[in-house]
Image (cartoon, rainbow, N blue to C red):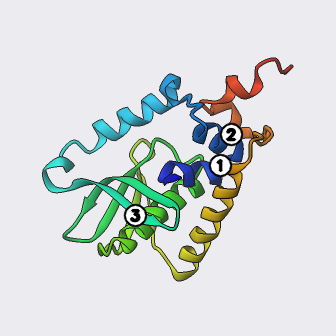
C-alpha cells in the first residue's frame, strides 16, 4: 500500500473521498477548483524555483510505502512551503504538512516547520510537528489501512464542503435537492 499526503488530506476531509481516490476513482482532473489551485501555486511564487526546490519524499514502514511531494523546501531555513487556493479545509492542509514534516523526520532531513500559504487570501499558517502529532499520524495510518481494505465505499457525508468537491456529481448523482 502506498500512502501519500493526499490520502492524509482526504482522510481529514471525507472518508468516502479517500476511499474513492484510493480505488482509482479520481475526479480531480475534471475539477475547475483543482485546476485553479494548480494555477495559483504556479503563478503565485514564480521566483521560488531559483531559491527553493521541490522534494519528493519516500519511506517504507511495515507493508506501507509513504510518499509526498513538497511544493517548496527552503533548506537553509529548514522550512516546508505548501501553497493552497483557500483555507476552507484548513485542518486537512495542516495535517498534510504535518505528514510532510513526519516524512522528512523519518528520512532524517531536518525541517523546523511548515508554512501553508494562501496567496489569494494573503494569509499564512505556520505548522509544527509535535510528538503527539506523530502518534496521531501513526493512528490514522492504521485507520486508513483499515478503511482502504474494506470493499464497501463509505456513505456520503452530506456536509457543506460537498458542494465544492470534485466528487460531488459522483456522490450525488440521482439525488434530489
Where is residue 157 shown, x and y percent of the image? 78, 41
Where is residue 123 shown, x and y percent of the image? 44, 54
Q: Residue at x 80, y 40 (%)?
A: 155
Tally of marks: 3
- Which residue is disc 2 drawn over? 161
Q: Secondary structure at mark 1?
A: helix
Mark 2 vs 1, N-terminal side? 1
- Which residue is disc 3 drawn over? 59
- Which residue is disc 1 drawn over? 13
Q: Nearer the viewer, mark 3 or mark 2?
A: 3
Q: Residue farthest to the right?
A: 176
Q: Are marks 2 and 1 in contact (CB under 8 Å)?
A: yes
Quadrant location, the C terminus? top right
| Front-most of residues 123 and 29 | 29
| Front-most of residues 53 and 57 | 57
Which class describes the residues within 10 Å of circle 2: few (<14), some (14-19), or many (20+)? few
Vertical placement of residue 78 versus 45, above or below: below
* Numbered circle sitting on residue 107: none
Q: Are marks 3 and 2 in contact (CB under 8 Å)?
A: no
Q: Residue at x 56, y 28 (%)?
A: 27
Q: Are marks 3 and 1 in contact (CB under 8 Å)?
A: no
Where is residue 38 shown, x and y percent of the image? 39, 35
Which class describes the residues within 10 Å of circle 3: few (<14), some (14-19), or many (20+)? some
Q: CA distance from mark 2 to mark 1?
A: 9 Å
Q: Residue farthest to the bottom?
A: 131
Mark 3 vs 1, N-terminal side? 1
Where is residue 141 shown, x and y percent of the image? 60, 63
Amino acid at each position: 500500500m502506498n500512502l501519500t499526503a493526499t490520502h492524509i488530506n482526504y482522510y481529514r476531509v471525507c472518508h468516502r473521498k479517500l476511499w474513492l481516490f484510493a480505488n482509482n476513482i479520481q475526479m480531480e482532473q475534471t475539477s475547475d477548483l483543482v485546476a485553479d489551485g494548480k494555477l495559483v501555486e504556479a503563478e503565485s511564487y514564480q521566483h521560488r524555483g531559483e531559491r527553493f526546490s521541490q522534494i519528493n519524499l519516500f519511506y517504507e514502514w511495515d507493508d506501507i510505502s509513504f510518499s509526498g511531494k513538497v511544493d517548496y523546501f527552503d533548506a537553509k531555513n529548514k522550512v516546508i512551503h505548501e501553497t493552497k487556493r483557500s483555507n476552507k479545509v484548513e485542518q486537512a492542509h495542516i495535517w498534510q504538512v504535518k505528514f510532510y514534516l513526519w516524512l522528512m523526520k523519518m528520512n532524517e532531513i531536518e525541517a523546523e516547520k511548515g508554512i501553508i500559504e494562501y496567496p489569494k487570501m494573503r494569509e499564512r499558517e505556520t505548522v509544527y510537528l509535535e510528538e503527539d502529532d506523530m502518534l496521531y499520524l501513526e493512528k490514522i495510518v492504521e485507520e486508513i489501512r483499515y478503511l482502504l481494505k474494506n470493499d464497501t465505499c463509505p456513505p456520503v457525508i452530506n456536509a457543506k464542503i460537498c458542494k465544492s468537491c470534485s466528487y460531488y456529481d459522483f456522490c450525488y448523482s440521482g439525488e434530489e435537492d
